Amino acid sequence: MKKTVLMTALLMLLVGCMGDKLNDKEKKIVGKWHVAKTEIMEESDEGYSGTFTMELTTDYRSNKTQTAEGFMRVRLNVDEDEYANTITLEYSISAKGTWSVEGNNIVEKMNEVNIEFSRTSTITNNEDDEVYIEAFKQYFDDFIPELRNEMLKKSREEIIKLTEDELTTKDDEGEEITYTRIE
């Protein structure tokens, strides 16, 4: 009986030691990080302008898996002939994947990405709202598979700054993204 208990304890100790070891940067990254990014959409020939906002909270776990949850919000300002309004479409986002730090880069690979329409709103209540809402919703629903496929691609971003509370990365297009630790 003592041998069985001792062997089980040794086996558990060995299995625990065989797990992925984290380097110093990975240890700093483990936790929950929030990022928010808004892009301005310039006025189109049709008279539409607006903003595109994405907010995500990512939980980087010590076993090098990650989950992300957040939303994408599209605000469209419409000023066409006799119709003027601001239409908002919102989509929920959730994702699961893996992560690691290689050299000075954070490497992420999402295995599962879900993007679902969640709600819409308008500033005014015009009789033409539904027509515009459906047209914009169809346009962005057609864009969702492209966004999902982009999120499923393996990404590699250079770590520019890493402190206990802030992570700034630069993507391959030179754009810097700053994450704030929330846990």
Image (cartoon, rainbow, N blue to C red):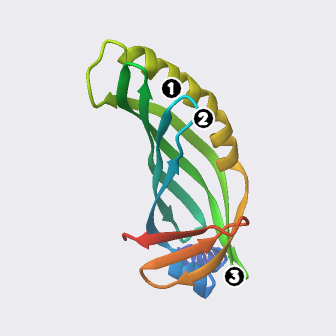
Choose between 60 and 91: the one closer to the eye: 91
Q: Is residue 57 above or below residue 140?
A: below
Choose between 41 and 45: the one closer to the eye: 45
Say which of marks 1 and 3 sits in front: 1
Badge count: 3
Residue at mark 3: 104
* Rendering coords of residue 36 (x, y %): 45, 59
* Rendering coords of residue 142 (x, y %): 62, 27
- The amino acid at mark 3 is Asn
Residue at mark 1: 136
Residue at image coords 64%, 80%: 21
Residue at image coords 52%, 40%: 43
The answer to whether residue 131 of the structure is visible from this angle is yes
- The amino acid at mark 1 is Phe
Numbered mark located on residue 144 in the image: 2
* Rendering coords of residue 14 (x, y %): 64, 79
Q: Do the residues labelled 2 and 3 touch (CB within 8 Å)?
A: no
* Rendering coords of residue 58 (x, y %): 49, 60
In what element is the residue under mark 1?
helix
- The amino acid at mark 2 is Ile
Residue at image coords 26%, 21%: 125
Q: In this view, does 143 lie above or below 27?
A: above
